[in-house]
Image (spheres, helix red, strand yellow):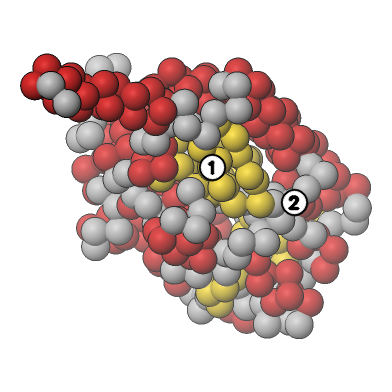
C-alpha cells in the first residue's frame, strides 16, 4: 500500500461507514396501554406505515398495545436496558422521566379547556425542552380530557370520602398528597391492576378521564361519577435519544413530521372525545353526582395547599408552577398580560 493510499483509505472507510450508518435500518419498539382495535391504535399504525414508506424501510416501528409490556414502571425499566426504545405515557407516567412533565395534571389547576389552551400555548415548549434535556424525544402532548371521580357510591363531600378505598397510580406523589388532603388513605396500584382491584373490591373509587374509564373497562363495575373535573389528563410518546440517535437526520425529520401531526390530531380530537365518552358513561347507567358550592370551595383550598406542598418538597419545579399560576391569573383577568416574564426553563 502506497503512502497516499494509506492516507486515503481511512477517509474512504469513514465515508463508507457514515453512508452505511445513515442507511441502516432501525426498528423502534414502543409500548402502550392502549388496546388494539381503538381509533388511537389505528391512526398510529397508519403513521408508522407512512414513515416506513417515506424512509424506504430505514425506520420502522413495532408497537406493543394493550399493556403487554407491563405497567409504566416496567416499561421504563425496559427502556433503560434497551429492550424497549419508547412508550406512551399519561401525565402521571411522564413525571418518571422529567418531574415537571406532570405540571398540567396537578389537581384543580385548570377549571376548563380555555385555561388549558392558554397555558399550553405559553408553556408547552418548556416542558418539551425539559424532556429533551432528560434524554427523551417527544412529539407533543395529546389531551385526554379531564379526570373525574368514578365510584361505587355517591361522592360529593369530604364526609362521603371517609370510607372510600381510592386508587392512585403507583409512585404518584402528587396524587397521594391530593387524596390525603381530602382525608382519604389511597391505595397505590399500577394502572394495569386497577380493573382487578375494582372487581375484587380492593378499591371502590378511581379518578380518570371518561375515555380512559371506558377503554380500560372500569365503568363496567362502577355506578357513580362526580360532576367535577379534577385534573387535566394528557399523554405523550417518549423515545430514548440513544436509539433515536442511530437514525439519520433526514429520517428523523420524517418521523417528527408524521408523529407531530398525529399528536396534533389526537390533541384536537381530545375535547370532542371527552364529551362523547361522558355522554356514553351516563347513557350506560352511571349516575352523575354534583358537588355543592361550599364543598367545592373547601376542596379548592385543600388541593391548592397540596399542590404547593408537593412543589416545595421538590416533587416538581415550584418556580415553574408559579409561572403557570401567573399565566392563569392573566387569562382570568387577575393580572396584566406580560407580567409573567420568562419561564424558568
Question: Residue 236 in the image: x percent, y percent?
Answer: 52, 40
Q: Residue 3: which quarter of the image?
A: top left
Question: Residue 12 in the image: x percent, y percent?
Answer: 26, 21
Question: Residue 22 in the image: x percent, y percent?
Answer: 41, 26
Is 294 displayed left or right of 41 in the figure? left
Q: Label 1: state its secondary structure.
A: strand
Question: Residue 307 in the image: x percent, y percent?
Answer: 36, 55
Is 114 displayed left or right of 308 in the figure? right
Count the marks: 2
* Residue that extends furthest to the right in the rendered view of this protein: 284
> Tag on residue 28?
1
Establish if 40 lies above or below 256.
below
Question: Which residue shows up at 51% across the image and 54% down it?
Answer: 84
Establish if 177 lies above or below 269.
below
> Tag on residue 266?
none
Question: Which residue shows up at 31% across the image and 33% down it?
Answer: 129
Question: Which quadrant, please, contains the C terminus?
Answer: top left
Label 1 to label 2, Cα distance in Å? 19 Å
Amino acid at each position: 500500500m502506497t503512502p497516499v493510499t494509506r492516507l486515503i483509505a481511512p477517509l474512504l472507510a469513514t465515508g463508507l461507514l457514515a453512508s452505511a450508518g445513515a442507511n441502516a435500518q432501525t426498528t423502534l419498539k414502543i409500548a402502550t396501554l392502549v388496546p388494539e382495535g381503538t381509533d388511537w391504535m389505528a391512526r398510529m399504525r397508519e403513521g408508522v406505515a407512512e414513515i416506513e414508506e417515506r424512509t424506504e424501510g430505514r425506520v420502522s416501528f413495532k408497537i406493543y398495545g394493550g399493556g403487554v409490556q407491563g405497567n409504566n414502571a416496567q416499561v421504563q425499566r425496559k427502556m433503560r436496558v434497551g429492550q424497549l426504545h419508547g412508550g406512551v405515557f399519561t401525565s402521571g407516567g411522564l413525571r418518571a422521566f422529567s418531574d415537571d412533565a406532570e405540571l398540567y395534571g396537578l389537581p384543580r389547576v385548570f377549571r376548563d379547556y380555555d385555561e388549558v389552551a392558554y397555558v399550553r400555548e405559553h408553556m408547552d415548549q418548556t416542558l418539551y425542552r425539559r424532556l429533551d434535556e432528560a434524554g427523551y424525544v417527544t412529539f407533543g402532548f395529546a389531551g385526554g380530557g379531564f379526570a373525574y371521580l368514578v365510584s361505587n357510591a355517591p361522592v360529593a363531600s369530604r364526609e362521603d370520602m371517609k370510607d372510600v378505598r381510592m386508587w392512585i397510580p403507583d409512585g404518584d406523589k402528587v396524587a397521594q398528597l391530593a387524596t390525603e388532603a381530602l382525608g382519604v388513605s389511597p391505595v397505590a396500584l399500577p394502572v394495569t391492576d386497577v380493573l382487578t382491584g375494582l372487581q375484587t373490591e380492593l378499591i371502590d373509587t378511581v379518578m380518570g378521564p371518561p375515555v380512559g374509564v371506558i377503554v380500560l373497562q372500569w365503568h363496567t363495575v362502577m355506578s357513580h361519577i362526580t360532576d367535577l373535573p379534577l385534573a387535566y389528563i394528557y399523554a405523550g410518546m417518549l423515545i430514548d435519544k440513544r436509539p433515536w440517535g442511530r437514525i439519520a437526520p433526514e429520517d428523523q425529520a420524517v418521523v417528527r413530521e408524521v408523529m407531530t401531526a398525529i399528536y396534533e390530531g389526537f390533541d384536537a380530537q381530545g375535547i370532542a372525545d371527552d364529551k362523547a365518552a361522558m355522554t356514553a358513561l351516563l347513557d350506560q347507567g352511571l349516575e352523575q353526582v354534583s358537588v355543592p358550592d361550599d364543598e367545592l370551595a373547601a376542596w379548592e383550598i385543600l388541593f391548592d395547599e397540596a399542590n404547593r406542598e408537593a412543589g416545595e418538597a421538590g416533587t416538581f419545579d415550584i418556580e415553574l408552577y408559579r409561572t403557570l399560576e401567573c399565566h392563569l391569573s392573566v387569562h382570568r383577568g387577575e393580572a396584566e398580560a406580560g407580567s409573567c416574564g420568562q419561564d424558568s426553563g
